[in-house]
Structures are given as structure tokens and as C-alpha cells.
Amino acid sequence: MAVLVTGGAGYIGSHMVLALLDAGHEGVVVLDDLSTGFDWAVPEGVKLVVGDVADQALVTQTILQHRIDALAHFAAKTVVPDSVADPLGYYLANTAKTRSLIEAAVRAGVKHVIFSSTAAVYGEPDISPVPEDLPLKPINPYGRSKLMSEWMIADAAAAHGFSYVVLRYFNVAGADPKGRSGQSTPNATHLIKVATQAALGQRSRLDVFGTDYPTPDGSCLRDYIQVSDLAEAHRLALDHLRSGGESLTLNCGYGRGYSVLEVVEVVKRISGRDFEVQLCPRRPGDPALVVAEASRIRERLGWQPSHDDLEAIVTQALAWENCLDKLHRI
């Protein structure tokens, strides 16, 4: 049997593919429209199907042709401020297309689903760290679009008998320690990505949005999870489901946070370069403090992160930016 990785040519999806290959999985198929992903991010020997996850005929054909029993769904739009400006685009990409994908998967007999969700479903939590059973109150269309998909998957699973794991990401960062993949989207908004680009002179400055939040230094505070650790969580979720495990909803984070200004200082120190930092007003839809209560994923999946080190994460991100710079010169 095989696993279909939607968005597998993108940032997190490509690391999931690497985690599967590293663990000896041979049946891996990628479905990606390459709108933000890259065909070169798909390892040699892995089948790449170029297309839309909402194309039910294509999804059905791919599932049947490759004997897919599990779906890992990463394809999505993920930028909070963009979701505020373009809510209908986000509900289309993240909710309507997920509905079409799940319907095709159910009809084609897929037994297991792993869904890429987000801490944005919690909104502005009034406790920290944030447990999975906290009331869900997303404050932006991105979070709402993902929560609606969570509900759809749970309802479809109850009706049609497949099992699922929903993984709620906190802030994903870093790159494959072996240098095989990383955050490659040129205009990405991830803080560490932007800060490393500023350090390398690829951006004129770094904007910090909001310095009056109720945090120690006034800037937003986040739980940064290294992308290979996150991919390993997905691999363990797949093993859990294939071995008959129950459906789960789990946070993916380390359980401690760093502020935006702290991250900026680490990037400056690791890179050995100063760069301009512009303090700006808050962005719509940004909560002040989001840190994971991350004990459940360790208990239920046996997840043991290997890369919980902000300096190492920044070092990986810098190395990947240098790699991309060389690729662009070729």
C-alpha cells in the first residue's frame, strides 16, 4: 500500500516525503499543483502527480492506480494576513478543496487520513501552554478554514469508517539537517525565513509587527517547531493509523516559546550580521502568545523530537538560504 502526500513539493510536505523514505517506505506519491511547491523538491524515484487536490477524477485515478491506503494532506494556503484580505480564497483552498479531496478519497477506499491543521484554531487562548481540549475560537479566516476542515474530516470519518490524525502545528521553522529541503518560497512570511534573508542581504529589512503585546518584550511569542521533527510526527501518525490506532487530534510544538525580538537577536548572532529591523503596528489576526501543551503527542505517538534547539534551527535556515542562493545563480 502507498501514501498520497498532497502538497508534497512544498515546505512541510517535502520533509514528510523525506521522513517516509528515510524510514524505508517505498510507496510514496506526491500530488501538488506546484503553485508554491517545486518539482525539484520531490526526491528522485517518488512519483509526482501535478494537479489540483479538488480534481476528483485525478485524485481517484491516482489513488486506484497506486493502491493508496493513506492520505497526508498538506496542500493549503497558510498566511494569516492574506486570509484576512482574501477570506474567500482561503475558504476555497483550505475548506472547499479539502471537502472535494476527502470525498474522492472516501469513494476510492482510503482508510487513513493525516490532516495538516494549525494552532490558529485556538485563536487568542487565555491559558498557556495551550491544550488540545481548549475551546476553539479562531480569530482569522485561516484558522476558521482549517477548523472547518477538521470538523469535516471528523464527521466523514464517523460516517464512512476511516481513521484520522489531525496535527495542529505551531510555528514551523528550520530545514532538513542534511540539506535536502527547506523553506523555498521566495516571498514566504515565516519569521525565521525572513530574518535569515535579511541577514544575507536578500531583503532590505525585517518588519516586526507589534511591540505592545502583553509579552515580556512586547513582541509576539511563538512555539517554534523544527520541520524535520514535525515530519517525524506525521510519520508516526501514519504508523499509528496503519497499526489500527484510534483517531486523534494532537498539538505539534515543543511547549516553550520565543518572542519575535528574541528570534531576531539569535539570527543576528548566528549569522554574524546586523540588519535593519523596523517596528510596525500590529497585523490583523495575530494573537499575542501561542505555546503548545505538547505532552499528548509524546504519550500517544511516542514522538521524541531531535531538533529542539533554536540556534540549530536558525543555522539550518541560514544554510538552506545559502543553498537556494547558489541554485538561483546556476
Image: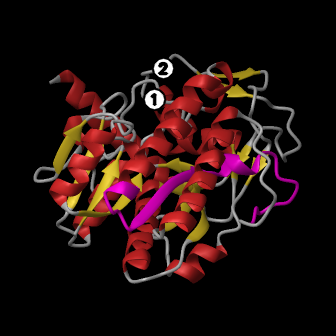
Q: Give the residue drawn at x 41%, y 67%.
A: 112
- Residue 175 picture location, percent across and down: 39, 49
Q: Nearer the viewer, residue 255 or 32?
A: 32
For the residues labelled 2 and 1, the Cα–Cα distance comes to 6 Å
Residue type, numbered disc 2: Arg
Q: Is residue 308 visible?
A: no
Q: For mark 1, what is the residue?
A: 197
Colouring mode (rainbow / by chain / secondary structure / one colour): secondary structure
Q: Neighbour class for label 2 at 10 Å: few (<14), some, many (≥20)?
A: some
- As drawn, 289 above or below 325: below
Which badge, 2 or 1, comes first in the chain's sequence? Answer: 1
Q: Quadrant of the N terminus?
A: bottom left
Question: Closer to the camera, 234 or 128?
Answer: 234
In this view, the residue farthest toward the left is: 45
Residue 299 appears left or right of 188: right
Q: Is residue 254 above or below residue 257?
A: below
Query: Residue placed at 17% from the left, 58% from the top?
Result: 66
Q: Which residues are magenta?
A: 106-131
Q: Which mark is residue 203?
A: 2
Secondary structure of the residue carrying numbered label 1: helix
* 105 relative position to 173: left or right: left
Can you tell which quarter of the image residue 55 is in? top left
* Residue 12 point in image, percent of width and height: 41, 49
Please give the name of the residue rendered at 74% of the width and 25% of the height, measured from the top-left corner: 283
Q: Nearer the viewer, residue 239 or 290?
A: 239
Extreme-top residue of the structure:
204
**Residue displayed at 58% across by 73% down:** 297
Determine whether label 2 and label 1 are within 8 Å by CB.
yes
Residue at disc 2, secondary structure: loop
| Residue 125 colored in magenta in the image | yes
Mark 1 is surrounded, within 10 Å at the Cα level, by few (under 14), some (14 to 19) or many (20 or more) other residues, namely many
